[in-house]
C-alpha cells in the first residue's frame, strides 16, 4: 500500500486569476481551433466541444443542430446500422460527428459492417469507449481499430493517469478520453472508491499527451465529464484539454434525448448514466448479474431550447478569454493562472446558483 499525498484538484477547487488584456471586444476572441494528429492524416477545425456518447445527448437530432455550430456530437452506442443508413440520406458533416464503439467482438463486427457499407467514411471521429481503459485487452483493440480505420481520428478512453495516456496514443489513438468518476450521472467513486480529481487528471494527462509528437502532430486529450458549469469547460481548456466532452450540460433540452416528464405541473427531462439500470434495461433488455449499476437516473428541470445554451456557452468562453487576456482558445493554457480556493468557504458557485 502507498499513499500519494499531494493534493489533486477538481474544477471547483480553483478559480482563474484575471490578467491584463489588450482585447477590445469579446467578439474578437477566436474560439475555433485547428488540430492535426499523431496518427490520423486529417486536419480538423471547429469548436473543440463534444456531447457525451449518452442516450440523453448523443443523438441524431442534436447533431443536426450542433454541427451548424461546428460542435461535435458523439453518438450513443445504440443506433443500428439501418438507422445510420437512414440518417445519412440527409446528413453530411463528417467533421462534427463521432461514431462510438465498445471493444466486444460484436462491437468490432458492427464497426466492420459500417465500413463495408461505406457508412464509417461519413464520420471523421471514432470513439472507442470503455469505463476502464486500463485493461490490457483495450490496447490490443485500439491497435486493431487503427488497422481497420487508418485515416479516422480515433478517440480512446477512459483513463486518468499519464503513463497509460502515452500507451494509448502509441497503440493507435489520436485522442485520449480522460475521466474516471467525475460524471454527474456516475456513481463509480461511490461504488468502487476509484477515481481521480478531474482538473488534475486533465493537467497531468495533457502534459504527457502533448509530449508525444511526430511530423504530423501531437497526442491530444478530451476532458470527459464533471463540467457542471460553462466555467468548468474554460478551466479544462486552461488545464490543457484539447477538447471538452459533456453529458449533463447538453442534456435536458427540448432537442436532447430522454423522455419529457411532467411532475407536479413542472416539466422535466430524463438524464441517466450509460451504466445505469435504466440504460442497461432499456438498451440491452437486461442487466447482467455480475454487473452493478454505476450510473444514476435523474429527472432534471427542462432547460428549453439548446440554441440559447449554445450562445451562453460561446459567450462565456469569450468572456473567460477577455478576463485572462487570451486572444484565442489556443492561448488559454499559456494565459491561465489557477488560484486554489477553499471549497467550503468559497461556495461561490452555489451563491451564483441561487441568484443571491
Ligand atoms: P457529465 O458531463 O454529465 O458530468 O459526465 C458525462 C460523462 O460521464 C460521460 O461522458 C461518461 O464518461 C460518464 N458517464 C456517463 N454515464 C455513466 C455511467 O453510467 N457510469 C459512469 N461511471 N460514468 C458515466
Image (tube, grey):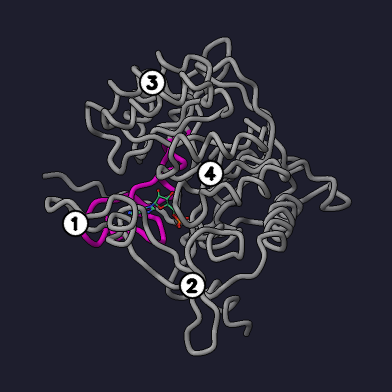
Residues at marks 2 and 3, CA–CA distance in whole angstroms: 36 Å
**Where residue 341 sits in the image (x, y, percent)?**
49, 64
Residue located farthest toward the right when viewing the structure as drawn = 24
- The vertical placement of 40 against 161, above or below, is above
Residues at marks 3 and 4, CA–CA distance in whole angstroms: 29 Å
3 or 4: mark nearer the eye: 3
47 sits left or right of 165 in the view? right
Question: Looking at the image, which residue is at 20% across and 55% down?
Answer: 192
Question: Looking at the image, which residue is at 27% across and 61% down?
Answer: 277
For marks 3 and 4, the one nearer the N-term is 3
CB of residue at label 2: within 8 Å of ligand 1? no
Q: Are marks 1 and 4 in contact (CB under 8 Å)?
A: no
Question: Residue 300: which numbered mark, if any?
Answer: 2
- The vertical placement of 5 against 161, above or below, is below
Residues at marks 1 and 3, CA–CA distance in whole angstroms: 28 Å
CB of residue at label 4: within 8 Å of ligand 1? no
- Which residue position holds label 3? 145
Q: Nearer the viewer, residue 243 or 274?
A: 274
Asked which secondary structure carries label 1, the reply is loop
CA neighbours of label 2 inside 10 A, class few (<14), some (14 to 19), many (20+): some
- Which residue position holds label 1? 292
**Where residue 166 sits in the image (x, y, percent)?**
38, 25
Magenta span covers which residues? Answer: 177-206
For marks 1 and 3, the one nearer the N-term is 3
Asked which secondary structure carries label 4, the reply is loop
- Which residue position holds label 4? 239
For marks 4 and 2, the one nearer the N-term is 4
271 sits left or right of 34 in the view? left
Residues at marks 1 and 2, CA–CA distance in whole angstroms: 23 Å
For marks 1 and 2, the one nearer the N-term is 1
Q: Is residue 346 magenta?
A: no
**Image quadrant of residue 132?**
top left
Amino acid at each position: 500500500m502507498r499513499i500519494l499525498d499531494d493534493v489533486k484538484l477538481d474544477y471547483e477547487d480553483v478559480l482563474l486569476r484575471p490578467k491584463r488584456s489588450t482585447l477590445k471586444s469579446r467578439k474578437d476572441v477566436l474560439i475555433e481551433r485547428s488540430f492535426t494528429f499523431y496518427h490520423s492524416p486529417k486536419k480538423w477545425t471547429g469548436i473543440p466541444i463534444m456531447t457525451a456518447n449518452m442516450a440523453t445527448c448523443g443523438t441524431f437530432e442534436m447533431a443536426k443542430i450542433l454541427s451548424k455550430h461546428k460542435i461535435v456530437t458523439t453518438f450513443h452506442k445504440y443506433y443500428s446500422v439501418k438507422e445510420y443508413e437512414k440518417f445519412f440520406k440527409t446528413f453530411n458533416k463528417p467533421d462534427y460527428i463521432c461514431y462510438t464503439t465498445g471493444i466486444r467482438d460484436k462491437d468490432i463486427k458492427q464497426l466492420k459492417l459500417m465500413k463495408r457499407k461505406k457508412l464509417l467514411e461519413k464520420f471523421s471521429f471514432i470513439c472507442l469507449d470503455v469505463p476502464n481503459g486500463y485493461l490490457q485487452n483495450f490496447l490490443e483493440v485500439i491497435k486493431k481499430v487503427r488497422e481497420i480505420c487508418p485515416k479516422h481520428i480515433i478517440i480512446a478512453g477512459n483513463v486518468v493517469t499519464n503513463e497509460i495516456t502515452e500507451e494509448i496514443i502509441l497503440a493507435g489513438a489520436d485522442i485520449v478520453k480522460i475521466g474516471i468518476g467525475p460524471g454527474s450521472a456516475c456513481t463509480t467513486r461511490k461504488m468502487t472508491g476509484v477515481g481521480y480529481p478531474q482538473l488534475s487528471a486533465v493537467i497531468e494527462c495533457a502534459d504527457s499527451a502533448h509530449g508525444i509528437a511526430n511530423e504530423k502532430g501531437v497526442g491530444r486529450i478530451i476532458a470527459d465529464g464533471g463540467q457542471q458549469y460553462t466555467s468548468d469547460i474554460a478551466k479544462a481548456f486552461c488545464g490543457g484539454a484539447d477538447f471538452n466532452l459533456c453529458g449533463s450540460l447538453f442534456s435536458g433540452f427540448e432537442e436532447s434525448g430522454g423522455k419529457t416528464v411532467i411532475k407536479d405541473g413542472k416539466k422535466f427531462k430524463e438524464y441517466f448514466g450509460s451504466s445505469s439500470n435504466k440504460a442497461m434495461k432499456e438498451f440491452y433488455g437486461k442487466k447482467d448479474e455480475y454487473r452493478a449499476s454505476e450510473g444514476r437516473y435523474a429527472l432534471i428541470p427542462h432547460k428549453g431550447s439548446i440554441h440559447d445554451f449554445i450562445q451562453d456557452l460561446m459567450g462565456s468562453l469569450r468572456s473567460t478569454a477577455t478576463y485572462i487576456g487570451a486572444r484565442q482558445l489556443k492561448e488559454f493554457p499559456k494565459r491561465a493562472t489557477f488560484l486554489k480556493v477553499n471549497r467550503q468557504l468559497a461556495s461561490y458557485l452555489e451563491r451564483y446558483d441561487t441568484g443571491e
